[in-house]
Amino acid sequence: MPRLAPFYTPGLLEAGCDEAGRGCLAGPVVAAAVVLPPRVRLPGLDDSKKLTADGRERLRPLIEQHALTWCVGIASVDEIDRMNILQAAFLAMHRAIAGLALRPQQLLIDGNRFNPYEDVPHRCIIQGDAKYRSIAAASVLAKTCRDAVMADLHEQHPAYRWIVNKGYPTADHRAAIAEHGPCVHHRTSFTLLPV
């Protein structure tokens, strides 16, 4: 069972932040911000990439129920193509943070870069979703939200098999792009097909 730390700085109201979908060829980038109580018990919580889809779906309502506050933010394909994926991911994180019912005193950001949010101090933590509970919880909410978005988009565009590949650059996704061409939900700033 994973042993994630409850906080980075004891005594501060910390929000963990993570995103999902940066490496995809289609769909939005989704971020979440989560503030957890110090002693909350969420059995099985871990980095969302280490969990099964069923495990993430089981944890999602527990996180939403037990968090002091949480919010999901989204940056669209148009925003990704206009500003680049990194800046769009930061925008989605900012939107998630802005939607929290409590203002955090510190942000714990998964990764090594971040655009500061207003005057709230932040810490960038490489592989933070495998180290801190609030970041792991944010990773689960971001991933489950984005998967739901891609499932809805699959209903509109079943040829791309987003229900399976979630928009990532898999062989079957690229084969579908080669056959049908890109659609409005593809990121035109990305290399959709190998040159």
Image: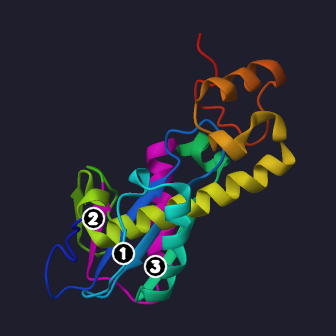
Label 1 amino acid? Pro
In terms of depth relative to the viewer, which is nearer, 28 or 178?
A: 178
Give the quadrant of the N terminus.
bottom left
The residue under the point 23% across, 72% down is 121
Q: Is residue 26 left or right of residue 141?
A: right
Q: Which residue is mark 3?
A: 63
Label 3 amino acid? Ile
Q: Is residue 128 left or right of residue 49?
A: left
Q: CA distance from mark 2 to mark 3?
A: 17 Å
Q: Find residue 47 and report its image quarter.
A: bottom left
Q: Which residue is mark 2?
A: 1
Please give the range of residues in magenta. 84-110
Q: Which residue is mark 1?
A: 43
User: x, y (%) of residue 30?
Assistant: 54, 58
Q: Nearer the viewer, mark 3 or mark 1?
A: 1
Q: Nearer the viewer, mark 2 or mark 3?
A: 2
- Callout 3: 10 Å neighbours few (<14), some, many (20+)? many
Q: Is residue 182 magenta?
A: no
The local secondary structure at tag 1 comes to loop
- First in residue order: circle 2 vs circle 3: 2
Q: Find residue 171 and report its image quarter.
A: top right
Q: CA distance from mark 2 to mark 1?
A: 8 Å
State whether residue 99 is above or below residue 66.
Answer: above
User: x, y (%) of residue 175?
Assistant: 71, 21
State whether residue 158 is above or below residue 189.
Answer: below
User: x, y (%) of residue 99?
Assistant: 51, 79
Label 2 amino acid? Met
- First in residue order: circle 2 vs circle 1: 2
